Image (cartoon, rainbow, N blue to C red):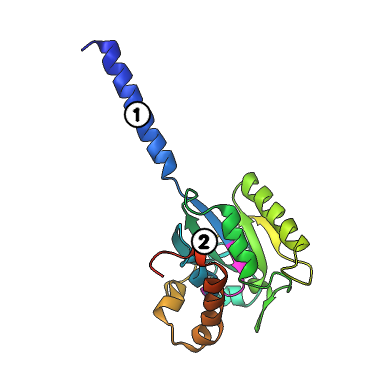
């Protein structure tokens, strides 16, 4: 077999491997929509989502503790970091879930949870995510989904850090806890009703 032929075969093989690798690449989205336990529980049930992590973002302190964040003095929001497969679920679809599963019209508040740490926020990683988020915000604002204007901030991701271990997978680990049964469970029921086409097959 000639050297040129061998080189051509190797090059083609590398291209195929690169294409497969590109197809399997995941992306990350970060959303603040009130208590991160709620946001985490919802996105854990979306088909195409690989992993969800509760964390903090948008403040001026690096690696804050939960107690620091809830004081409202660090500027952080409670967020969910969503890793997803864009070949299964698009960023636009994740945003649609975002708009429908919390109230983006209440400033620094979700229900009884009050404070800047509970603000509605989309933290973007790229100009493309920013543009998609702003377009989605305008579209939702112009729709009849919410009566009042949306106050969600669309801002670049800064000072993200993972929340403490006991905040991770919270609803799944504590389904009978008071907050889970009173607040999260009804949100999940509504999500499943509104988005049956986006549910993971196992649900």
Q: Is residue 63 magenta?
A: no
Residue named by callout 2: 81
Q: Residue 197, relative to residue 180: is it above or below?
A: above
Residue 159 visible in image: no
Question: What secondary structure is marked by label 1?
Answer: helix
Residue occupied by mark 1:
14
Q: Residues within 10 Å of mark 1 (few under 14, many from 20)?
A: few
Residue 192 sits above or below residue 138 on the image: below
Task: Assign the N terminus to one quadrant of the image.
Answer: top left
Residue 138: x %, y % from top left: 75, 57
Q: Position of residue 24 (x, y in %)?
A: 41, 45
Q: Which residues are magenta?
A: 31-37
Q: Residue placed at 26% from the left, 12% from the top?
A: 3
- Residue extending furthest toward the bottom: 178
**At 69% from the left edge and 69% from the top edge, which residue is drawn?**
104
Tell me the quarter of the image containing the C terminus: bottom left
The quarter of the picture where residue 144 lies is bottom right
Q: Can see residue 156? A: yes
The residue located at (44%, 71%) in the rendering is 168
Q: Secondary structure at mark 2?
A: strand
Instruction: Judge whether 70 appears above or below 55 on screen.
Output: below
Q: Residue at coordinates 53% horizontally, 80% vertically from top-left?
A: 184
Instruction: Determine contact: label 2, label 1, CB under 8 Å.
Output: no
The one nearer the camera, 119 or 50, is 50
Give the number of marks.
Answer: 2
The local crowd at label 2, few if under 14, some if 14 to 19, many if 20 or more residues have their Cα within 10 Å, is many
Place of residue 118 in the rendered image (x, y in percent of width and height, measured from the top left): 64, 73
Name above or below for residue 153 compared with residue 183: above
Q: Using the rendered view, name the quadrant where residue 35 is placed.
A: bottom right
Q: Position of residue 147 (x, y in %)?
A: 78, 72
């Amino acid at each position: 077999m000639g050297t040129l032929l061998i080189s051509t075969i190797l090059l083609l093989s590398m291209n195929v491997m690169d294409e497969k690798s590109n197809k399997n690449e995941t992306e990350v989205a970060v959303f603040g929509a009130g208590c991160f336990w709620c946001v985490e529980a919802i996105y854990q049930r979306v088909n195409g989502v690989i992993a969800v992590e509760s964390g903090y973002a948008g403040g001026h302190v690096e690696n804050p503790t939960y107690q620091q964040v809830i004081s409202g003095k660090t500027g952080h929001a409670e967020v969910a970091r969503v890793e997803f497969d864009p070949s299964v679920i698009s960023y636009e679809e994740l945003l649609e879930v975002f708009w429908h599963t919390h109230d983006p019209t209440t400033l620094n508040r979700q229900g009884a949870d009050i404070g800047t740490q509970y603000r509605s926020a989309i933290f973007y990683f790229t100009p493309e995510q920013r543009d998609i988020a702003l377009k989605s915000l305008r579209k939702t604002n112009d729709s009849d989904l919410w009566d009042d204007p949306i106050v969600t901030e669309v801002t670049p991701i800064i000072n993200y850090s993972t929340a403490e271990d006991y905040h991770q997978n919270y609803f799944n680990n504590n389904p009978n806890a008071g907050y889970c049964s009173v607040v999260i469970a009804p949100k999940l029921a509504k999500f499943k009703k509104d988005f049956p086409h986006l549910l993971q097959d196992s649900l």
